[in-house]
Image (cartoon, rainbow, N blue to C red):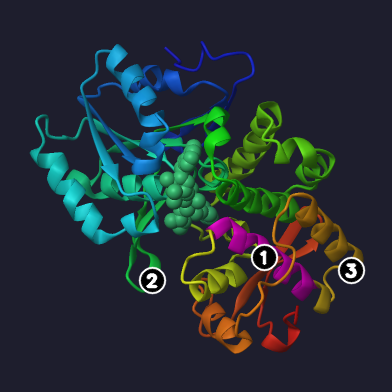
């Protein structure tokens, strides 16, 4: 039976098409309590191993998921990691793998790991699942806007090395994604804005229709209106599902386009010693990329003005963060994974809703402010 058949009317279900590894993304409001039912449909499931972080647990989301799993009669174990990027580590992975195989009901090949939380729980949970017994299934239940529009879809899973982000990882697709916009109501404002940075990225670089929707709904977006959020998350997931289906491993020149603004953002994140949330660094990076595209003659002044105005209306960074060393920024940008043989490759906009990879742009073309 299709577990999404009984969804509330305002629920959207999308498919990431990857042959036998295809999966569904369910987007709704108040649907966290359906987690058990959706998970049970991945049968056979010997054990649901729920991974969450301390903040998400404090808000009761993991308990809600756990009780819906228990109601189905499934066996369950819960593991809690400290909230924060530091948990995406090999050390934390080792601790959890040991726990998974030594707990009262050890995880086996029919276990499904359910990651309940933001991108940290999702990336770590996926990494654990990709490697435990050479790969078990995992289910994404993202509770931050960033994870709902980006990290929970597409199967990029990883942990960090002390000096290098996402350095050890894999492509390991989840078996499903369950999104409840209600969880966003408790998200700290800084984290909410971080997710909006990724939303604007999709709109500017890949979907002019979504861009217009954002411009026309800034007040409701700032107010976290559930209906508006469902629409935005569904549109972002639709774009990501299409791109992942066409270019799962970023080898066909399509998935790379999801990196608009990210080369600049990566430098800002490192320079802030990761105190700047990823999506806020992306928002600043989008403005840098737009201004660089203007200098390179790819877009006009109006494009930059329009994007800046949207950032301001959404309370997103609308200029280059102050106090950053420009030459250090260029050095860090060259460490970007897209760099090939020392040649910087930037994703730059060509018009609203369209972008392309541009090679060999030199620092002189970067904006001053
Ligand atoms: P996060 O998981 O650290 O969550 C941000 C904060 O919000 C944490 O303190 C968390 O405890 C808290 N939180 C989560 N849900 C909450 C809720 N509903 N209410 C209140 N608090 C809540 O960070 P994130 O921004 O979700 O994700 C960032 C991570 O995602 C980074 O590690 C980044 O590398 C990764 N990422 C991965 C991909 C991918 O494709 N795999 C894409 C983008 C980012
Ligand atoms: N967040 C970029 C990607 O998933 O490819």
Give the residue number, with chain letter if any, for mark 3: 300
Q: Which of 43 and 245 is in front in this view?
A: 43
Give the mark, 2 or 1, whose residue is nearer the N terminus: 2
Relative to 165, say whether 34 is above or below. above
Label 2: few (<14), some (14–19) or many (≥20) C-alpha neighbours in 10 Å: few
Identify the residue at horizontal 52%, vertical 72% (top origin).
272
Identify the residue at horizontal 32%, vertical 19% (top origin).
67
Q: How far apart are marks 2 and 1 (CA)?
A: 21 Å
Give the residue number, with chain letter if any, for mark 1: 284
Q: Are marks 3 and 2 in contact (CB under 8 Å)?
A: no
* Percent of width and height locating residue 283: 66, 60
Identify the residue at horizontal 40%, vertical 23% (top origin).
35
* Percent of width and height locating residue 91: 22, 59
Give the mark, 1 or 3, whose residue is nearer the N terminus: 1
Label 3: few (<14), some (14–19) or many (≥20) C-alpha neighbours in 10 Å: some
Q: How far apart are marks 1 and 3 (CA)?
A: 19 Å
Does the residue tagged 2 have its C-beta within 8 Å of any atom of ligand 1?
no
Q: Nearer the viewer, mark 1 or mark 3?
A: 1
Observer able to see residue 343: no
Whether residue 292 appears in magenta in the rendering, the answer is yes
Identify the residue at horizontal 34%, vertical 42% (top origin).
54
Q: Is mark 3 on a helix, strand or loop?
A: loop
* Percent of width and height locating residue 325: 60, 85
Give the mark, 3 or 2, whose residue is nearer the N terminus: 2
Q: Is mark 2 on a helix, strand or loop?
A: strand
Give the residue number, with chain letter if any, for mark 2: 164
Relative to 21, say whether 358 is above or below. below
- Residue span colored magenta: 278-293
Quadrant where the C terminus is found in the figure: bottom right
Q: Distance between the residues labelled 3 and 2?
A: 36 Å
Q: Are marks 2 and 1 in contact (CB under 8 Å)?
A: no
Q: Are marks 1 and 3 in contact (CB under 8 Å)?
A: no
């Amino acid at each position: 039976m299709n577990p999404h058949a009984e969804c509330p009317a305002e629920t959207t279900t999308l498919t990431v098409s990857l042959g036998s590894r295809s999966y569904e993304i369910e987007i709704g409001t108040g649907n966290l309590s359906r987690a058990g039912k959706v998970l049970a449909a991945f049968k056979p499931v010997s054990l649901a191993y729920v991974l969450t972080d301390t903040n998400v647990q404090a808000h009761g989301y993991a308990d809600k998921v756990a009780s819906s799993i228990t109601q189905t009669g499934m066996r369950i174990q819960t593991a809690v990691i400290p909230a924060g990027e530091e948990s995406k580590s090999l050390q934390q992975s080792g601790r959890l793998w040991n726990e998974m195989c030594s707990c009262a009901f050890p995880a086996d090949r029919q276990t499904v790991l359910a990651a309940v939380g933001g991108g940290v729980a999702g990336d770590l949970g996926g990494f654990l699942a990709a490697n435990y017994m050479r790969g078990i299934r995992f289910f994404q239940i993202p509770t931050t806007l960033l994870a709902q529009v980006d990290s929970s879809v597409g199967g990029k899973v990883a942990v960090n090395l002390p000096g290098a982000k996402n350095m050890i990882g894999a492509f390991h697709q989840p078996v499903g994604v369950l999104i409840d916009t209600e969880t966003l109501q408790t998200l700290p404002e800084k984290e909410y804005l971080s997710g909006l940075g990724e939303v604007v990225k999709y709109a500017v670089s890949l979907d002019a229709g979504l861009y217009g929707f954002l411009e026309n709904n800034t007040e409701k977006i700032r107010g976290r209106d559930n209906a508006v959020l469902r629409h935005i998350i569904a549109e972002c997931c639709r774009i990501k599902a299409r791109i992942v289906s066409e270019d799962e491993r970023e080898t066909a020149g399509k998935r790379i386009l999801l990196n608009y603004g990210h080369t600049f953002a990566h430098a800002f994140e490192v320079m802030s010693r990761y105190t700047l949330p990823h999506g806020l660094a992306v928002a600043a990076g989008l403005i840098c990329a737009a201004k660089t595209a203007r200098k390179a003659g790819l877009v006009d002044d109006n494009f930059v003005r329009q994007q800046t105005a949207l950032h301001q209306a959404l309370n997103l960074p609308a200029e280059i963060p102050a106090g950053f060393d420009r030459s250090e920024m260029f050095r860090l940008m060259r460490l970007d994974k897209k760099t090939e043989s020392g040649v910087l490759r930037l994703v730059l906009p060509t018009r609203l809703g369209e972008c392309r990879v541009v090679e060999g742009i030199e620092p002189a073309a970067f904006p001053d402010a």
